[in-house]
């Protein structure tokens, strides 16, 4: 009898369910990778409410099944923690789906044709907005062109009465037609702003291409037009964008989204939706604002695990430079294909240092966009100075967003300083065909997307897509991390590849750690959020060529199935 009672007590302590409530959800008969080194793989899982209550064998978890329990038979399929988008633009993703999508255009005339068709559907004076073009992905350069970029005349001809703003895939340059430049006050007499450039022809006339901060007058003119909407229409547009972004994320297995820069007004809107139970993914938001606004508002915008862990605001986003594709990344040496330029510094160092002081004072993470090797070095220098002046402040987990191109001397500094490299694997394979053109062979090999080198020094690497720059789908990003294979079939310096386990961790537990959220997400364990993805294929074992065909079958958020294929 004593042996029997002891066995029953042991079962009860293991399952917590012999005399307890049944689970709301049980997954069984599968390969569940937990990304928890203490219990890396199990057959089954039970969740009650938002949380995981138990993991183990089918037999053990069977004790959690009650009359109302939803049971999903995995049929041997792979289940993993929900993907965490480590760096993206949530509202931008939704908005991109409401505008001209230019990523697949393979020539400048094809883009002009899209605009011409759009003109026929809008009223005169309405802005036409598009995003996603990339001159390096066109089949041939436009004619005529400046630095491989088109002149605005074709665009202005097909849209004489509608201002047009076509944003580069990176978001760091744009093409505008004559009407848009007129509304923005951009003329041959306009000067290049600090951190920006207006491209001109030989006669000094703007060609319609603007880099970095030179886009600001266009953005302001567009914003003036948007401000004319009624409050009802403005809110409806925001809700539509958020609904589209949410559906896209959940269909692709993204349960948490680290939003790389939103203004206070948008954060207020996110909070309103979260409190109403209408924010469909978990958002972790970086604040995008100048130092004056940050100093005034940070104290009341430190929001952690709000509305059942659907909204956290505890980081600041700043930009040190632009993008490599637009020749805006700030380099230590000139561009190989544009020797007159070393890129652009978009935020002065004293301003960056003040942001760092504000972040430290208010307990915020600082997340700084830095793509070029000069930008990364300058940001690391600022971080190091702040850390040295405040030795009592530990485990800050400040981040560099992108960290795409590093000087070899700066690679060990990430681990030494505790700076997280928030990178995007898909950028490597999407950009790889033209990176050597920009940097030259030596610099590209030494420090372009140096994932393995960073990991070997002990740095924490988190992954994302920078959506809408790239598709928010994690599967191509996972494939990129483990193969570095470009569309041409070649691998971009394959010695920097990650293992599949490292790639999975970069998309789950590491991304959670990069947001101080590893206690609640990023791995599957009792007491953690039941955010789970079930895949059609085992991406950890199938041939790499089959990874890209993997689909999300179920997305589970807080123990509830929110997407089912």
Image (cartoon, rainbow, N blue to C red):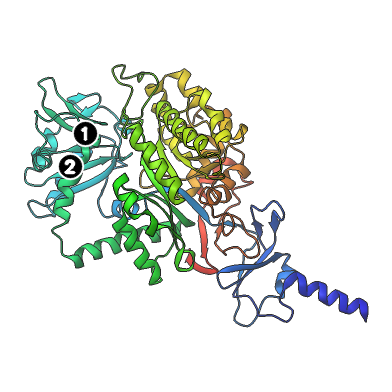
Location of mark 2 (residue) = 218
Could you tell me if residue 295 is visible in this image?
A: yes
Q: Residue at x 6, y 46 (%)?
A: 161
- Whole-percent x and y of residue 250? 45, 60
- Secondary structure of residue under mark 1: strand
Location of mark 1 (residue) = 210
Q: Residue at x 9, y 21 (%)?
A: 203
Q: Is residue 136 left or right of residue 503?
A: left
- Whole-percent x and y of residue 555? 51, 62
- Mark toward the start of the polypeptide (1 vs 2): 1
Which of 532 and 282 lies nearest the eye of the viewer? 282
Q: Give the quarter of the figure containing the N terminus.
A: bottom right
- Whole-percent x and y of residue 163? 12, 45
| Contact (Cβ within 8 Å) of mark 1 with mark 2 | yes
- Secondary structure of residue under mark 2: helix
Residue 219 in the image: above or below residue 58: above
Residue 1 in the image: above or below residue 353: below
- Whole-percent x and y of residue 73? 62, 67
Which of 204 and 409 lies nearest the eye of the viewer? 409
Which of 126 and 272 lies nearest the eye of the viewer? 272
């Amino acid at each position: 009898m004593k042996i029997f009672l002891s066995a029953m007590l042991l079962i009860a302590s293991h399952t917590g369910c012999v005399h307890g409530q049944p689970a709301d959800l049980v997954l069984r008969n599968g390969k569940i990778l937990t990304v928890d080194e203490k219990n890396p793989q199990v057959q089954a899982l039970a969740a009650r409410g938002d949380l995981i209550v138990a993991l183990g064998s089918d037999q053990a978890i069977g004790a959690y099944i009650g009359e109302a329990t939803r049971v999903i038979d995995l049929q041997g399929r792979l289940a993993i923690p929900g993907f965490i988008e480590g760096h993206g633009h949530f509202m931008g993703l939704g908005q991109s789906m409401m505008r001209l999508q230019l990523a697949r255009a393979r020539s400048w005339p094809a883009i002009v044709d899209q605009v011409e068709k759009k003109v026929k559907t809008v009223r005169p004076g309405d802005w036409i907005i598009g995003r996603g073009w990339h001159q390096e992905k066109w089949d041939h350069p436009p004619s005529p062109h400046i630095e491989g970029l088109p002149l605005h005349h074709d665009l202005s001809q097909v849209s004489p009465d509608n201002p047009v703003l076509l944003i580069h895939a990176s978001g760091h340059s744009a093409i505008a037609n004559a009407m848009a430049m007129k509304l923005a006050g951009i003329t041959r007499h306009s000067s290049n702003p600090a951190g920006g450039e207006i491209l001109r022809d030989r006669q000094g006339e703007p060609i319609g291409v603007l880099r970095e901060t030179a886009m600001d007058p266009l953005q302001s003119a567009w914003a003036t037009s948007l401000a004319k909407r009624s409050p009802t229409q403005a809110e409806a547009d925001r809700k539509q964008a958020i609904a589209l972004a949410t559906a896209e994320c959940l269909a692709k297995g993204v349960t948490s989204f680290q939003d790389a820069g939103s203004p206070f007004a948008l954060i207020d809107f996110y909070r309103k939706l979260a409190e109403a139970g209408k924010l469909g993914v978990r958002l972790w938001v970086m604040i995008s604002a100048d130092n004056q606004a940050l100093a005034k508002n940070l104290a009341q915008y430190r929001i952690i695990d709000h509305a059942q862990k659907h909204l956290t605001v505890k980081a600041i986003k700043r930009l040190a430079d632009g993008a490599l594709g637009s020749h805006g990344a700030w380099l230590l040496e000139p561009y190989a294909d544009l020797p007159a330029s070393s890129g652009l510094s978009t935020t002065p160092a004293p301003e960056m240092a003040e942001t760092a002081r504000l972040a430290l004072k208010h307990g915020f993470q600082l997340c700084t966009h830095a793509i070029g090797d000069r930008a990364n070095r300058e940001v690391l220098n600022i971080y190091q100075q702040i850390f040295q002046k405040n030795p009592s402040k530990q485990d800050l987990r400040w981040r560099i967003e992108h960290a795409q191109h590093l000087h070899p001397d700066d690679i060990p500094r990430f681990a030494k300083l505790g700076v997280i490299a928030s990178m995007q694997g898909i950028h490597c394979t999407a950009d790889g065909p033209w990176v050597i053109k920009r940097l030259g062979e030596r610099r590209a090999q030494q420090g372009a997307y140096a994932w393995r080198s960073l990991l070997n020094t002990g740095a924490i690497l988190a992954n994302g897509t920078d959506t809408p720059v790239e598709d928010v789908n994690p599967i191509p990003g996972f494939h990129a991390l483990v193969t570095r294979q470009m569309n041409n079939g070649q691998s971009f310096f394959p010695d920097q590849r990650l293992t599949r386990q490292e790639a999975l961790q970069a998309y789950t537990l590491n991304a959670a750690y990069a947001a101080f959220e590893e206690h609640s997400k990023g791995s599957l364990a009792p007491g953690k959020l039941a955010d789970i993805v079930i895949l059609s294929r085992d991406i950890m074992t199938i041939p790499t060529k089959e990874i890209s065909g993997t689909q999300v079958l179920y997305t589970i958020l807080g123990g509830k199935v929110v997407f089912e294929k």
